[in-house]
Image (tube, rainbow, N blue to C red):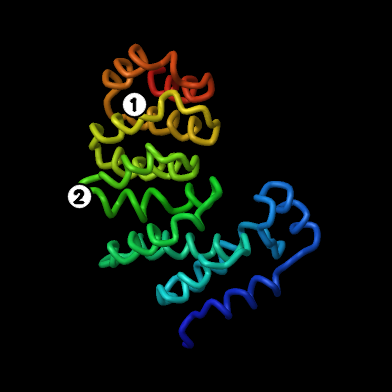
Amino acid sequence: MPEPTAAGVRSALEAAASVDERAKIRRRVTDGTEVIGVRMGTVFEIAKANERMPLPDVDELLRSDTYELRMVAVSILDFQARRPGADREALYTLWMRRIDRIDTWDYIDRAAPRVLGWYLLDKPRDALFDLARSDDLWHRRMAVTAAFWIIRARDLDDPLALCEILAADPEHVVQTNVGVALREVGRVDPERLAQFLERRGADLSAHARRTARTALG
């Protein structure tokens, strides 16, 4: 079987393009982002078929200005992170090197928990705190989204500290995932969530507060 390549991914995406899908995607992506017009289910199927792609080719996809090419790239990183014996350091390093190419909520949600959070399970999380304090809203969303995997491991101190930093964040796209992180904290330790909400609940957006409180019944 031939080795997956960035060029092969582009060809597969172009073969699956539709004018209607292109119009739908254009309505929700950043101005200037190129769109091929492929439905997300097909994008993920193409990523899965190319999950063993060498990282230099994944890097090429991340450097693209095309929405679907970058979605394939982050999906491949996620698929590779799931594999036994994955080189998590290499995946993490590539993500951080191309961090400014990962600039939509769906890129972040697709892969940050496993690519960032899983790698950092047994390591200092300084990078996440730097992201949480960034002026870039996508970096801030990334920080709290990566924490989902850390919460899953029942390690709550750093995720709660990240939520402290982001509790009053003015951006809806950050607040939504702060709410999710707090909800997941509450499923592990309801008392710690209740304490957080008593102290910082008024700083959260109404949406984040509602999401967090679902863990308390």
Towards the viewer: 49 or 142 = 142
* Residue at image coords 44%, 17%: 203
Residue 56, how many percent across, how many down?
42, 76
Quarter in which the C terminus is drawn = top left
* Residue at image coords 38%, 57%: 96
* Residue at image coords 41%, 40%: 134
Mark 1 vs 2, N-terminal side: 2
Q: Is residue 49 left or right of residue 28?
A: left
Label 2: which residue? 123
Mark 1–mark 2 Cα distance, whole angstroms, equals 20 Å
- The reply to whether callout 1 and callout 2 are in contact (CB within 8 Å) is no
Residue 196, how many percent across, how many down?
32, 19
What numbered label is drawn on residue 34? none
Neighbour tally class for label 1: few under 14, some 14-19, many 20 plus, Cα within 10 Å: some
Quadrant hosting residue 105: top right
Q: Is residue 137 above or below residue 25?
A: above
Q: Disc 1 residue type?
A: Glu
Towards the viewer: 140 or 152 = 140
Label 1: which residue? 164
Q: Is residue 209 left or right of residue 71?
A: left
Residue 116, how many percent across, how many down?
34, 52
Q: Is residue 191 above or below residue 70?
A: above
Neighbour tally class for label 2: few under 14, some 14-19, many 20 plus, Cα within 10 Å: few
Q: Is residue 5 above or below residue 153?
A: below
Residue farthest front in this picture: 135
Total of numbered circles in the picture? Answer: 2
* Residue at image coords 41%, 77%: 54
- Let me know if residue 42 appears in the view: no
Quadrant hosting residue 87: bottom left
